[in-house]
Amino acid sequence: MKIEFGKCIKITGMKEFIVFLFAGLIVLSSSFAQQQEPVVTGPTLTWDKATHDFGDIAQGDKVEYTYRFTNSGNESLIITNVTTQCGCTTPKGWPRDPVPPGGKGEIIAAFNSAGKFGKQHKVVTIVSNAVNLEGAQLILKVNVLEKKSPD
């Protein structure tokens, strides 16, 4: 077997051909391994802290927490609604205007422990045009203890 590629590569036998083929496969596979992750375009919700644990509170107490976020995407973020699982958890406010890339905002969630007892795990869902689904939920945890009667 005799293969010539100009004056650079000259393969005269089967052994050289196999070595050449193997080297070519290594070069090709290394070029595929270096492909970059696709760039995500659109608004992205990035939370300073997406879960808050109030710890122990007495039955009947009302607590609230301010969740802070950044739009780390490359388009304006528009929050159209904030929903909760039940009436005991209430969103008190969120930005009504578009949040530009790099802009910051906050959502306040309140919890009323009246009629609740034990460990509570409430989810606040953000309805928006964000491209990251993991940024669409906030978690509120609390352990409601029985209210002690004054003696």
Image (spheres, grey):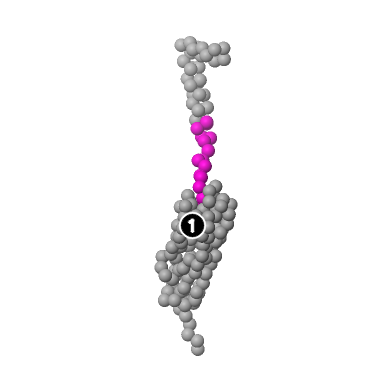
Outermost residue toward the top in this view = 2
**Which residue is the site of mark 1?**
79
Residue at 47% over, 52% down: 129
Report the magenta residues as a range.
30-44
Viewer can see residue 134: no
Outermost residue toward the bottom in this view = 151
Expressed as whole percent of the image width and height from the top left, the position of residue 27 reads: 52, 27
Residue at 46% over, 73% down: 112
Q: Is residue 145 above or below residue 72?
A: below
Tell me the chief SS of the magenta region: loop
Q: Is residue 34 above or below residue 90?
A: above
Residue at 42% over, 70% down: 87
Label 1 sits on what residue type? Ile
Q: Is residue 8 above or below residue 125?
A: above
Expressed as whole percent of the image width and height from the top left, the position of residue 40 reads: 51, 44
Magenta-span inclusion, residue 7: no
Residue at 49% over, 30% down: 29
Q: Give 53 or 88, whichever is nearer the viewer.
A: 88
Expressed as whole percent of the image width and height from the top left, the position of residue 23 reads: 51, 24
Expressed as whole percent of the image width and height from the top left, the position of residue 4 reads: 51, 12
Q: Give 107 or 120, whichever is nearer the viewer.
A: 107
Kindly state the secondary structure of the residue where label 1 is placed: strand
Q: Give 34 or 14, whichever is nearer the viewer.
A: 34
On screen, residue 26 versus residue 87, left or right, reads: right
Viewer can see residue 74: yes
Q: Give 137 or 6, whichever is nearer the viewer.
A: 137
Magenta-span inclusion, residue 35: yes
